[in-house]
Image (tube, rainbow, N blue to C red):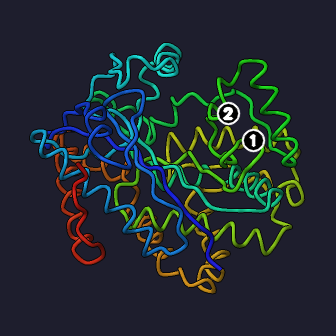
Amino acid sequence: MLLSKGLEIEIYTGTPQGEIVGLSDRIVKNLDGFVREPDNRNVEYTTPPCCSYESLLCAILQPRLQLRDYIKTLGDYTLIPGSTLSLGNVADFFRSDPNNPYHTYIEETYGTDVVTASVHINIGISDLEQLMCACRLVRLEAPLVLALSAASPFLGGKVTGSHSRRWQVFPKTPTHVPLFTSHQHFVDWTNEQLELGTMQNVRHLWSSVRPNGDRRPYSLNRLELRISDLVIHPLQLLAIVAFLEARIQQLLAQSHLDPLKSSQLSPAKLLEITDENEQLAAQYSLDATLTHWRTGQAIAAKDWINDIYDEVYPFAKAAGFACFLSPLKKLLREGNQAQQWLSAHEQGQSIEQIMQQAIAEAAQLDQELAQYLCEPAALVA
């Protein structure tokens, strides 16, 4: 049986030349289904929960085509790949809603470190203790998703030295988040953070993975993976979602995968190596050497992903979505977005040329996929 899936997709707007331009205030005013981020240069849309991967693909594309059509009415504007301000102004914060006090807090506390674009992947799990178990496992393996999705090697027109600059500087909040042993543990911990002020509200939990639901921390129904950079290629994004779902399907069938049961390491040590793995994956992505949570031994990120792929493939096949998982192999062979961009830069292309080509390719790909898979999306007045 397929699990429900939904995505929160943040994306920059700008010009075909790669200049990032803030349009979210007008987008949110005139298009249904889009919400503003604190900075005006990116905008977010959310796909409705669905089990079918075909439906999810259309749910990714249709709002994006609608957004593309709308911003063209404002000028020569398009959508910008990447998860950082690759060619943007990194010194100034461009407020989308100057009167929002939470946005004021974000700007004053974090500055432009949070002006990033990403994909949050939500997987539906109704049983609360199974959900907490899935959060434990996925958190320890989240660096692998970062390695697959890394797409932010540039910032402000310069090479940053890391494949995911976004996750390297993004302020994980609170600074220490435990492996939750139960739902009650999560409830108690969250209320304590709110009392201490380390979280401003129940949404102010910015870790790689968190439980999510309609009334946090009490009413929960999904796992939210927040570590992924923006994956602009829809089929690659579906492959990463399929990788995550298949791993959770395996966990639901094989409860011994719970790190609290199967690891040789203490919870404190698991958190320590996971934090290190996140930083290594942010720096080197698929080229990183990580520490396996089960054994404490070094393992190449690619090898670890391949190992899990082999484990989960039968579960994806049995549930009927193995074809959506298979593009992961091509991604591993050819490299993620950051690796491809850095390779082009090493071969002599400027960052401006790389971004302009990526912008054009993303627009073309959206149109090609939409031609075969989606009904035309109409503008909403």
Query: Can residue 307 be seen in this snapshot?
Result: no
Q: Is 97 positioned to the left or the right of 261 in the image?
A: left
Task: Determine the CA span between mark 2 and mark 1.
Answer: 7 Å
Q: Amino acid at mark 1?
A: Pro
Tell me the tag on residue 202: 2
Q: What residue does disc 1 label?
A: 217
Query: Can residue 375 be seen in this snapshot?
Result: yes
Tell me the tag on residue 312: none
Question: Can you say which quadrant of the picture contains the N terminus?
Answer: bottom right
Q: Amino acid at mark 2?
A: Val
* Residue 316 in the image, given as x and y percentages of width and height: 60, 79
* Residue 85 in the image, given as x and y percentages of width and height: 32, 32
Say which of 163 and 71 sits in front: 71
Sequence-wise, the earlier of marks 2 and 1 is 2
Rendered residue at 45%/48% (across/down): 150
Marks 2/1 in contact by CB < 8 Å: the verdict is: yes
